[in-house]
Image (spheres, rainbow, N blue to C red):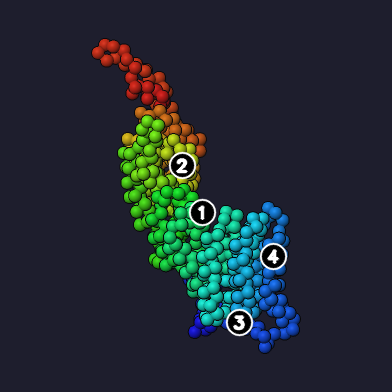
Amino acid sequence: EWEETCFLDKSFHGYYKWPKIIKYPMNKRERYTKENMPEDVAILYERFIDNNFINKFTQFMVLDEEKGKISFDARRFNMFKGLFRNYGSALVDNFIERLYILIHEKTKEKQEGSHRVAAEIVAAMIRGSKYWTIEMLDDLWKKLTPFLNEVCLNLGPETLSYWGSCFKLGLEDEDPRRMYRPIEYLRSLTNTHASGNTFLETSRWYLLQTITNFEWRVPSIWCFINEQARELLDHPYKAIRERIAIILSLSLTFDVTLPNGQATRHPKANPFIDMIRERLQQAIEIYEKTPLANVSGQVVEIDPKARKALNFIETVIQLHTHLFSKCLQPIKDAIIRIFPYLCELESIVANDDFIRKSLTVSRMCVAMTYLHKHYMEALIEQLEQICSSPKWHARRAAIEFVQNMIFCNLFNARPYAQRLRQLVFKCLFDEQFEVRTVASVTLSGFYQCGYIQINNDDLKYFRVMSKTSYFTKVDGKKITSAENIVKRHGG
């Protein structure tokens, strides 16, 4: 049955519709055996069945790179792939034995090169076994699985990229049904108990990203990844949180609406983002009520709840940004609903330059997206509410966002010019100096790009406001009026 199965290796088949005629290769290939080998083929076989030759050959490949220029070599990968494709499993045992030696190389200068060669060989095994029988594949993965587990315990910053390339090339342009064994292995990496080593945990999630080779064709795996990763949004280690933000955005990539229907089996972005929004609201409340650090004498105590809340907030900001770089249709109703919280966070991250800049970028991603009428209408309603918020940081962020949104949606935002004019005028006379300053920049930008036409009534109004007296009389005494200062500054 395995050899008669129809496998479609290209991921574009069936994405929009199925072609009327599908041509696919048979899942069967002839392999050389000792009995049917031509003389020239037998020469190669005799070489690579020899342990001594394999040892010398791999040692040569380890050293055959200039220092500082070591990279995964696709040519060697193709060479080994041809060996495993043509000779089947006959060479596996000798190579597996050598692979263990390579990943446990003790000489520091050779470690990076040894991992690179091992990764090239393993990628070739995965790809070269494409047309093997199911019994041969089962036997191969009984040997590869413990080896790959050993690899995951011996990864380093210099070698991780090689194993990422290994899985990327090994799984590229393959039917996920054919590759269910490596997929299952990658899925199992999420179940590995925490080792206490941050780098190794991050590495496992990095390797799991190679599932993207199968794009939309593994919805159940994406659902599983989404369920597992969402539990780590407030992980104590930043490196892991950054990786989780990427993997979660990838899991939502294929929640798309097409002309002939909508994806139904992939993780849904709207419920997921709504869940994030509820947790984000709780995190904001916790952080605002509980100081992050308590100073007692010379001891500084970090409140664990506040720290966890800030971790979650930071990850959500990164996740929101990645959604716009990874997803095919990033703008969703839930993205509009979570937007007010991205403005509200401005006061929380004001003292952290890195998070504050990340937050600004995340809002800019929304502004730079083409907004259809439905989303534009909903977003303007949210902006009007934010500009009435008691938090001036949120009001400033919202009015700054308005300018960027209009510049990137100048033509489809024309019907809302009057509403946004009123909104900017309102902020122009806001009680907070910072809000008024940003509103003046936004309004001048509208005038300069022609989104709002400047007229004599506006100019007259600004002249009158700019001449407002600072002083007013209360009980016969001349005092400075804060309200008049706001009017004069706004004018």
* Of the image marks 4 and 2, the number of the one nearer the N terminus: 4
How far apart, in angstroms, are the residues tagged by discs 3 and 1? 41 Å
Please tell me whether residue 429 is drawn above or below residue 383 in the rendered image: above
Tell me the kind of residue under disc 2.
Ile
How far apart, in angstroms, are the residues tagged by discs 2 and 1? 22 Å
How far apart, in angstroms, are the residues tagged by discs 3 and 2? 55 Å
Picture quarter with the C terminus = top left
* Of the image marks 2 and 1, the number of the one nearer the N terminus: 1
Disc number at residue 29? Answer: 3
* Of the image marks 1 and 4, the number of the one nearer the N terminus: 4
Q: Do the residues bearing badges 1 and 4 touch, measured as CB atoms within 8 Å?
A: no
Asked which secondary structure carries label 3, the reply is loop
Residue hosting label 1: 199
Residue 481 visible, this angle = yes
Please tell me whether residue 176 is drawn above or below residue 367 in the rendered image: below
Tell me the kind of residue under disc 3.
Arg
Mark 4 surroundings: few (<14), some (14-19) or many (≥20) residues within 10 A:
some
Q: Which residue is drawn at 49% across and 61% down?
A: 208
Q: How many labels does the image show?
A: 4
Q: Nearer the viewer, residue 190 or 180?
A: 190
Residue hosting label 4: 59
Q: Do the residues bearing badges 2 and 1 touch, measured as CB atoms within 8 Å?
A: no
Where residue 108 appears, as percent x and y from the top left, is 64, 55
* Of the image marks 3 and 4, the number of the one nearer the N terminus: 3
Tell me the kind of residue under disc 1.
Phe
How far apart, in angstroms, are the residues tagged by discs 3 and 4? 32 Å
Disc number at residue 355? Answer: 2
How far apart, in angstroms, are the residues tagged by discs 1 and 4? 28 Å
* Of the image marks 3 and 1, the number of the one nearer the N terminus: 3
Disc number at residue 479? Answer: none
